[in-house]
Amino acid sequence: MYAVTANATSHLRRHGEATMHILLIYDITHDGTRTKVARACEDYGLDRLQLSAFAGKLTKQYQRELMSRIKRLMRKKAGVVTLYPIGQDAWDAQIEVRNDDQ
């Protein structure tokens, strides 16, 4: 599970607008574009889960803004980016297997 500090996302909340959990995954072949998309996700307070997966909480408006920004960044480069809004009940039911030993 990811941890988001209050300061990291406080600028992303609009007056009274609810946030929801999101999972954003991508498969982008162009290195520079992939890096720009990752930075955009970080700019919106999302936390990297894996090399091509981010999670966090965003309002619907910021979800649309982030995806619009990503569309501009990708221009005509090959790739796909998918944002999955996840309700609280589904988020709470997640199951994770983790082994940090190497």
Image: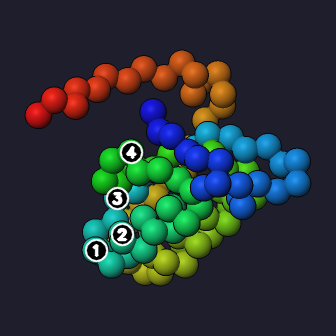
Mark count = 4
Q: CA distance from mark 4 to mark 3?
A: 14 Å
Say whether marks 1 and 4 touch (CB < 8 Å): no
Q: CA distance from mark 1 to mark 2?
A: 5 Å
Confirm whether residue 23 shows in the render: no
Q: Is residue 66 above or below residue 99?
A: below
Q: Which residue does the numbered mark 1 point to in the structure image? A: 31
Q: Is residue 4 above or below residue 36?
A: above
Q: CA distance from mark 1 to mark 4?
A: 19 Å
Three-letter code, disc 2? Arg
Confirm whether residue 36 shows in the render: yes
Q: CA distance from mark 2 to mark 4?
A: 15 Å
Q: Which residue does the numbered mark 3 point to in the structure image? A: 27
**Quadrant in which residue 74 is drawn:** bottom left
**In the rendering, at what x and y percent does residue 90 appear?**
59, 24
User: For the N terminus, which image quadrant?
Assistant: top left
Q: Nearer the viewer, residue 19 or 34?
A: 19
Three-letter code, disc 3? Asp
Three-letter code, disc 1? Asp
The tag earlier along the polypeptide, 2 or 3, is: 3
* Mark 2 vs mark 4: in front: 4
Q: Is residue 22 left or right of residue 53?
A: right
Say whether marks 1 and 2 touch (CB < 8 Å): yes
Mark number, residue 34: 2
Q: Nearer the viewer, residue 90 or 27?
A: 90
The tag earlier along the polypeptide, 4 or 3, is: 3
Three-letter code, disc 4? Leu
Please name the residue shown 57% across and 27% down the image: 91
Q: Which residue does the numbered mark 4 point to in the structure image? A: 49
Please name the residue shown 34% across and 65% down the image: 28
Please name the residue shown 16% across and 29% down the image: 101
